[in-house]
Image (tube, rainbow, N blue to C red):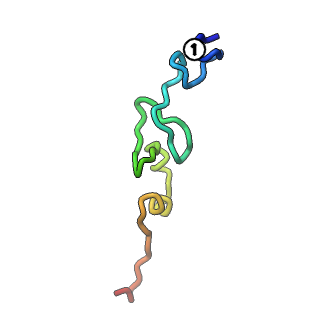
Amino acid sequence: MCKECYMHPCHPRCPNSPYPKTIYRCVCCWEGITDGEEYIKYGGDYYHADCVKEMSLHELGELFDFRVETAGECEE
């Protein structure tokens, strides 16, 4: 049993944990962003780079505040 967290195996937040330390929390998947992982910070929120890569164009539009439109010949 760990003398810090009193668990076996250690809790992931324990300094004795064999798991990588969580530095930020991804607001998309709610999993930890650990040392060495690529991430995006936007508006004070953190996202795994892979989570953003998997988003559709419309989801990205909602996140970054733009609209996806379809062009038409009669537009002016």
Q: Position of residue 30 (x, y in %)?
A: 56, 42
Question: Which quarter of the figure has residue 10?
Answer: top right
Residue drawn at (43%, 73%), measured in percent from left and top?
69
70 lies above or below 32: below
68 lies above or below 26: below
Q: Position of residue 64 (x, y in %)?
A: 42, 59
The amino acid type found where label 1 is placed reads Glu
Residue drawn at (45%, 32%), measured in percent from left and top?
23
Local packing at callout 1 (Cα closer than 10 Å; few below 14, some 14-19, many 20+) is: few
The quarter of the rendered structure image containing the N terminus is top right
Secondary structure found at label 1: loop
Of the pair 76 and 7, the residue shown nearer to us: 7
Name the residue furthest left. Answer: 76
Q: Position of residue 28 (x, y in %)?
A: 53, 47
Disc 1 target residue: 4
The quarter of the rendered structure image containing the C terminus is bottom left
